[in-house]
Amino acid sequence: EKRLLCRRIPQAQLEVCEVEAEVAQVSDTASTSVTRVTYTEHRTQCLKRAIFSLGDTNAAFAEKAAAERERLQRAREVVRSELQRLDAEREELHLIIAEHSEDLACVQAAVAASGEKERALSSQAAILKAKIAEFRHLSPRLLQDRQDLIGKIREATATDAG
């Protein structure tokens, strides 16, 4: 939109200058040679003003373009430094992950070994529970046998003593 307006301004200035020159020409109809000189001088003055105005506009745009180039260069530098920082951070995270992967492998091996140990101990516990159940089953019978033996020993000692 600015470009369009900036393109229209010089054209409009030229049109104004031409209109002013025509007005000057019509008002000075008394003398054609004087009118031509006046018209030419007036047109020259208008063209000079238009050229100076265009030069000023061009200088302003050149300053804006230089400022924009500088701003873009600073933005590129900021983005580059941020990308470098992120790359360094990513490398650091990769190293940490590698260290943790080794630790994780050790922990997984320990967990697997513990699982095997637990299964072995579970099977031993099951065997021991079976033996305990067998002994509990035999215990009352053995207690009766023991009491019978004690009773026989007492009878034998009572008959020997008597």
Image (spheres, rainbow, N blue to C red):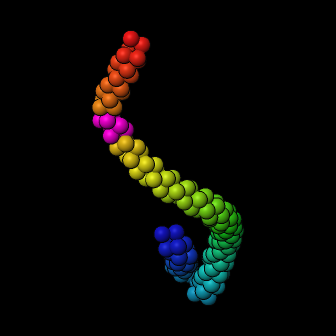
The quarter of the picture where residue 149 lies is top left
- Residue 55 position within the rendered picture, expressed as x and y whole percent measured from the top left: 67, 75
Q: Is residue 34 above or below residue 1?
A: below
Residue 159 visible in image = yes
Q: Going 43% across and 48% down the picture, which residue do you hit?
A: 124
Q: Going 40% across and 17% down the picture, which residue do you hit?
A: 160
Q: Is residue 59 above or below residue 143?
A: below
Work out whether residue 121 or residue 50 is closer to the camera in this orientation and state it.
121
Q: Going 38% across and 47% down the picture, which residue do you hit?
A: 127
The C terminus: image quadrant: top left
Magenta region's main secondary structure?
Answer: helix
Where are the magenta residues, as a range?
Answer: 132-139
Residue 78 visible in image = no
Q: Is residue 40 above or below residue 116?
A: below
Q: Going 34% across and 23% down the picture, which residue do you hit?
A: 152
The quarter of the picture where residue 142 lies is top left
- Residue 154 position within the rendered picture, expressed as x and y whole percent measured from the top left: 38, 18
- Asked if residue 61 lies left or right of residue 155, the reply is right
Taking the magenta stretch, the answer to whether it contains residue 133 is yes
Work out whether residue 130 or residue 8 is closer to the camera in this orientation and state it.
130
Work out whether residue 6 or residue 42 is closer to the camera in this orientation and state it.
6
- Asked if residue 25 lies left or right of residue 86, the reply is left
- Residue 69 position within the rendered picture, expressed as x and y whole percent measured from the top left: 67, 71
Q: Is residue 77 above or below residue 138?
A: below
- Residue 91 position within the rendered picture, expressed as x and y whole percent measured from the top left: 65, 66
